Image (cartoon, helix red, strand yellow):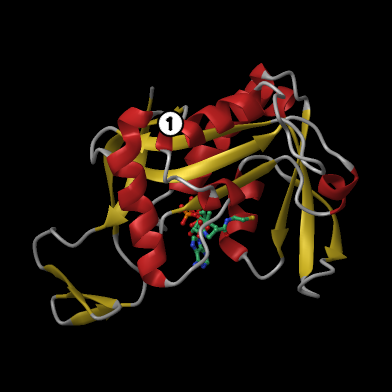
Amino acid sequence: MLTFLKRTLATKSEGIELVGNHLEWQGLNLLKFALMEEQIMLKLVKPDIKYKNQYLEMLGEWKGTGEQPQPWVLHEDYSDFNAMVQKFENLSKGIDVPNGFVPSSTYWAYDDESGKIVCAVNIRHYLNDMLIKVWGNIGYGIRPSERRKGYATIILKLALECCKTLKMERVLLGCYKENIASAKTILKNGGVLENEVIEENSGKLVQRYWINTKSILDE
Ligand SMILES: CC(C)(COP(=O)(O)OP(=O)(O)OC[C@H]1O[C@@H](n2cnc3c(N)ncnc32)[C@H](O)[C@@H]1OP(=O)(O)O)[C@@H](O)C(=O)NCCC(=O)NCCS
């Protein structure tokens, strides 16, 4: 388990109130959110039946927003929860991997303080022809209510540590150019831009970044 500093909106400090999208302090609109820091305990956990309630609660929130959950593992059928967990375990061991897919490890990010799952991560153990073109080794998504608190930056760091354990020295990540938050998350974790390509399905520009896990994590 790791401890990190979480940045949150300073809504409780004396004289500061959240008004619409602005903070008001002594009658002044502060255009930038004031930030305060608090400690959080965050860990990547393997999918497990014991997190069923928290997992369904996260998915429910996602569905309520109408946004497609990411990464793809969040679309797995959970009606037989144990079967879904077993499927993820099998995929991590290279068992019953569907055509066109590669072995992958799935984790959920669990915040001990709130008792919530805040994110899912899918680590592809190697790249096939399709993955190397655009989306690379790691997919992640933070549940809507937990964004802009620094989670993605921390979780990508934890995922890179998993990659290192899996002896993946160089990791490819792809994100839409318009996805500023994801690009910043990758850059803050040592991402080096390789190039920009057009994704065939959407016609959108995707940025491809490499991260060298050895040099980043041995610092
Ligand atoms: C992209 C995503 C993972 C970012 O998660 P997050 O927890 O909000 O990110 P963080 O809080 O760690 O912020 C990372 C950086 O992005 C910035 N950022 C976050 N949301 C932003 C937004 N909507 N617009 C602009 N910048 C944003 C943060 O300020 C931070 O940069 P800073 O340190 O310079 O201030 C999250 O928005 C998400 O899950 N989106 C949907 C799924 C997705 O896009 N997954 C990635 C696929 S490549």
In-front residue for pair 208/46: 46
113 in relation to 11, above or below = above
In-front residue for pair 127/9: 127
Q: Say whether residue 17 is left or right of residue 9.
A: left
User: In which image quadrant can residue 55 be found?
Assistant: top left
State the residue at coordinates (70%, 24%).
95
**Around disc 1, counting alpha carbons within 10 Å, would you say few (fewer than 14), some (14 to 19), or many (20 or more)?**
some
x, y percentage for residue 50?
Answer: 31, 29
Q: Which residue occupies the extreme left position in the image?
A: 14
Q: Can residue 73 be seen in this view?
A: yes
Identity, as a three-letter code, of the amino acid under mark 1: Asn
Quarter containing the C terminus: top right
x, y percentage for residue 201?
Answer: 79, 70
140 in relation to 115, above or below = below
In the picture of the structure, the residue carrying the numbered disc 1 is 82
x, y percentage for residue 73?
Answer: 57, 46
In-front residue for pair 8/219: 8
State the residue at coordinates (75%, 24%).
168
User: In which image quadrant can residue 128 be found?
Assistant: top right
Q: Which residue occupies the extreme right position in the image?
A: 129
x, y percentage for residue 206?
Answer: 77, 63
Q: Is residue 145 visible?
A: no
In-front residue for pair 64/168: 64
State the residue at coordinates (85%, 69%).
200
Secondary element at image label 1? helix
Q: Say whether residue 4 is left or right of residue 160.
A: left
User: In which image quadrant can residue 37 be found?
Assistant: top left
Quarter containing the N terminus: top left
Disc 1 Cβ-to-ligand 1 distance below 8 Å: no
State the residue at coordinates (30%, 78%).
21
